[in-house]
Image (cartoon, coloured by chain):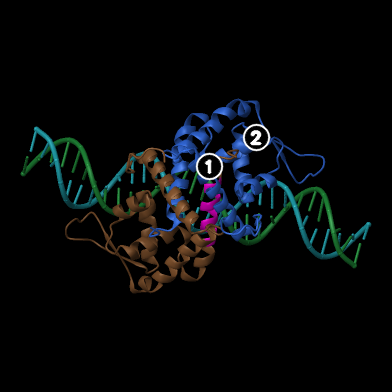
Chain colours: A brown, B blue, C green, D cyan
Amino acid sequence: MDKDPLIKWISIIYRYSLIYANEQLKDFNISAGELSFFIAITDMEGITQEKLSSYLRMNKGTTAKAVKSLETKGYVIKRIPESDKRSYNLYPTAKAVELRKRIRKLAFEWNDILLKGFDKKRRKEAALIIEKMAKNADMCINRSGEDDGKKDQ
Amino acid sequence: MDKDPLIKWISIIYRYSLIYANEQLKDFNISAGELSFFIAITDMEGITQEKLSSYLRMNKGTTAKAVKSLETKGYVIKRIPESDKRSYNLYPTAKAVELRKRIRKLAFEWNDILLKGFDKKRRKEAALIIEKMAKNADMCINRSGEDDGKKDQ
DNA sequence: AAAAAATAGTTTCAAATGCAACTATATTAC
DNA sequence: GTAATATAGTTGCATTTGAAACTATTTTTT
């Protein structure tokens, strides 16, 4: 049963997610790599790149590039706050806000594809498991995931 | 609960897996991207690139590059079979076979990190869920995953 | 307040990957 | 058996990403 390590399947899910997103986003001039940044910025107006990086667990260089691209494409505006001139607050443009719902929907349609054949209870279980695994990974790499101290359950 | 789409967590798990593997593999002159190819070739001696691509669900171009790199590094030998001169059979070198166990162990140590805090039953459940999700993704992108026809369970 | 350290972001380089066009060989159709 | 199609692999180009070195501010130390 554990002939293949989990990472084999995770890798497939991740790579196919990018393929799917690229296909679906073709008409919007947003790339798969930019998707999570787009969603986060439209959801959390005014967020800084630093916060964005830590929220998505992305390298800050990656964040810089994605944000710059979204800015060039007219989806994001950067504003330097008086309070800290090193940083930017990121705001979605009207054009981005207009697309927000459709783009978010797309991410959740992919959820439904991944969870096809799962009943409600198993969907919830899947979400919990995946999120916990990500937090375990985070804890290992950054020692920053909150270890909730819970024992095996 | 479903504020964030699953892909956010999948992305974190995948990217952190690469970071972990790159760190752990430093001494072996094998990169994270080559890892799954290394394991598959040492497990399935004589496999072709075509089969390898379909087994790992990797683009054949990606496979070609990874295999070439593993060959350059002295881990893989390509042999053209009489039966089909277009293809290669891939064999691990002695050097690869020698490392095989340690490299495989590494992949499963990462499993243990991801599944920290999960009891036996939940580990099995996690493996089933992840594999099913990957097959759902595969089905969507390639219409090739075997749809087992099972209803929601 | 000057020096040192921390923080926010950018840029360069390299790795991982997909796609599409390409070559070479095999198989199928006619 | 030749032409058309399919299959196996390679290569060039683009995207996604991380690491590390860098600049510019801010905060902390002394």
Which residue: 60% across, 36% down? B39
User: What's the CA distance linking mark 1 and mark 2?
Assistant: 23 Å
Q: Given the image, on which type of amino acid does mark 2 rest?
A: Asp
Tell me if residue A5 comes above or below residue A72 in the rendering: above
Q: Which residues are magenta?
A: A9-20
Residue indicated by mark 1: B124
Tell me if residue A118 comes above or below residue A96 in the rendering: above
Q: Chain of mark 1?
A: B
Q: Is residue B20 visible?
A: yes
Q: Position of residue A43 (x, y in %)?
A: 33, 64
Q: Nearer the viewer, residue B143 or B117?
A: B117
Tags 1 and 2 on a common chain: yes
The residue carrying pointer 2 sits among few (fewer than 14), some (14 to 19) or many (20 or more) residues within 10 Å by Cα, namely some
Q: Position of residue C7 (x, y in %)?
A: 24, 47
Which residue: 59% across, 29% down? B100
State the predominant SS element of the stretch in magenta. Answer: helix
Element type at mark 2: helix
**Quarter of the image where one finds residue A90:** bottom left
Q: Chain of mark 2?
A: B
